[in-house]
Image (cartoon, rainbow, N blue to C red):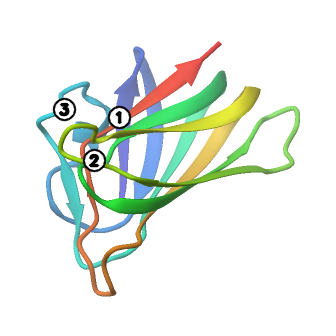
Amino acid sequence: QQAEVQLDGEPVRVRYSFLDMGEIQQVFDGDEFTFVRTAEVNPLVIELLFPRPRRLSGLDLIIGSAEVEITAETSGSRAPSERQFTIRAKGSLEQPQVHLDFGESVAVQQMRINLLDRSDQDPAHVHLWEIYFNGN
């Protein structure tokens, strides 16, 4: 699926896995009570194309109580080579947010986020409440 969402006042093109609950804009709305759910697809894949490069140092994701593997693949306009960052984490009701640290500030024009629910077999419904971008 494809859509355009507003992030920090800029239009961002988004491609993403099929959803059976919620709309992709809800992942970026700052409301931790709205969520999306994939239509029996694991992993949830979200691809972003920013209108201009952004400096990012990581991501925070609200994943609920799932056990996940999150991979972010990034590329920039001047440095088109891909970078990949991965974390395995388990959320909980008390701490549903996980942090993916890039270890440095990276210029990002395109990003692909894979959210694999490791505690569920295919077909599975992957839930995601929110994505926050950490910049420098």
Binning the other alpha carbons within 10 Å of mark 2 as few (below 14), some (14 to 19) or many (20 upward) gives many
Q: Of helix, strand and loop, which one carries label 2?
A: helix
**Dot 3 surroundings within 10 Å: few (below 14), some, or many (20 or more)?**
some
Contact between marks 1 and 2 (CB within 8 A): the answer is yes
Q: Circle 2 is placed at which residue position? A: 24
Quarter holding the C terminus?
top right
Residue identifier under label 1? 5
Mark carried by residue 65 = none
Instruction: Give the camera-side residue of 57 and 79.
Output: 57
Q: Amino acid at mark 2?
A: Ile
CA separation, marks 2 and 3?
Answer: 13 Å
Q: In this view of the protein, which residue sits in the foreground, 69 or 28?
A: 69
Alpha carbons under labels 1 and 2: distance apart: 8 Å
Where is residue 76? Give x, y as percent. 77, 36
Q: Earlier in the sequence, mark 1 or mark 3?
A: 1
**The disc labelled 1 sits on which kind of residue?**
Val
For the N terminus, give its image quadrant: bottom left
Left or right: 62 as drawn, with respect to 45: left
Residue type highlighted by circle 3:
Glu
Across and down, in percent, residue 3 comes to 35, 47
Q: Residue at x 42, y 61 (%)?
A: 68
Depth check: give the residue in front, 30 or 60: 60
Q: Which sits earlier in the primary sequence, circle 1 or circle 2? A: 1
> Residue at label 3?
32
- Seen in the picture, residue 36 relative to 96 is either above or below; the reply is below
Residue 42 occupies quadrant: bottom left
Q: Could you tell which of marks 2 and 3 lies nearer the N-terminus?
A: 2
